[in-house]
């Protein structure tokens, strides 16, 4: 545990900031992919593919629509599509709200977006809430 803490502190140093942001961006995207892949396997096994497609389509569509009307500059200054975090929403929609490991992955993706300076903390929180809503509305029963 101490080794992980030391590595995190080293990665957070100002000299490594740009590399850390890029790594966090890639890791957060990878975490979303892992969460969706796990959800696909779960939903196919339980014959819930329709809900998977609706849930992910709704999550992506709502985030993109919001970004069209809300122009919030990203912390890295790259564009005005910070609000809200689509990565966080997708990670949470895909069973992050119901499984402990899924929840951890979703939170990790959100933290990664903040560290990568792609989103403000409030953007991630709203994304997580949007994901919970989509997951709740279109679940896959056991």
Image (tube, rainbow, N blue to C red):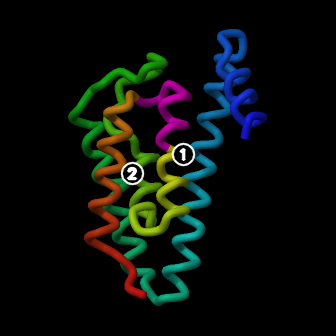
- Label 2, residues with CA under 10 Å away: few <14, some 14-19, many ≥20: many
Q: Residue at x 30, y 63 (%)?
A: 134
Residue at figure coordinates x 69%, y 32% from the top left: 5
For the residue labelled by badge 2, is the local secondary structure a helix, a strand or a loop?
Answer: helix
Q: Mark 1 points at which residue?
A: 108
| Prevailing secondary structure of the magenta residues | helix
Tell me where the magenta segment starts and ends, as one range: 110-119
Height in image: 108 above or below 48?
A: above
State the quadrant of the N terminus: top right
**C-alpha gap between disc 1 and disc 2:** 12 Å
Residue 133 versus residue 13 in the image, above or below: below
Q: In which quarter of the image is residue 6?
A: top right
Q: Name the residue under label 2.
A: 89
Q: Is residue 65 above or below residue 61?
A: above
At 29% from the left and 43% from the top, the residue drawn is 126
Q: Where is residue 22 in the image (x, y as percent from the top left)?
A: 65, 28
At 38% from the left edge and 39% from the top edge, which residue is drawn?
124
Q: Where is residue 63 in the image (x, y as percent from the top left)?
A: 32, 47
Q: Badge 1: few (under 14), some or many (20 or more) residues near its Cα, within 10 Å?
A: some
Nearer the camera: disc 1 or disc 2: 1
Looking at the image, how many numbered discs can be counted on the residues?
A: 2
Query: Which corner quadrant holds the C terminus?
Result: bottom left
- Residue 113 magenta-drawn? yes
Question: Is the residue 95 above or below the residue 69 in the image?
Answer: below
Q: Is residue 114 magenta?
A: yes
Tag shown at residue 125 = none
Q: Are marks 1 and 2 in contact (CB under 8 Å)?
A: no
């Amino acid at each position: 545990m101490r080794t992980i803490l030391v590595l995190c502190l080293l990665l957070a140093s100002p000299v490594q900031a740009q590399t850390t942001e890029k790594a966090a961006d890639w890791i957060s995207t990878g975490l979303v992919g892992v969460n969706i892949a796990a959800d696909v396997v779960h939903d196919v096994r339980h014959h819930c593919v329709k809900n998977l497609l609706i849930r992910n389509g709704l999550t992506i569509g709502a985030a993109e629509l919001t970004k069209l009307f809300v122009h919030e500059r990203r912390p890295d200054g790259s564009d005005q599509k910070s609000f809200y975090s689509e990565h966080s929403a997708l990670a949470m929609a895909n069973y992050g709200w119901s499984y402990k490991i899924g929840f951890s992955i979703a939170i990790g993706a959100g933290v990664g977006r903040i560290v990568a300076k792609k989103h403000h903390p409030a953007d991630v929180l709203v994304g997580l809430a949007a994901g919970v809503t989509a997951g709740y509305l279109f679940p896959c029963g056991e």
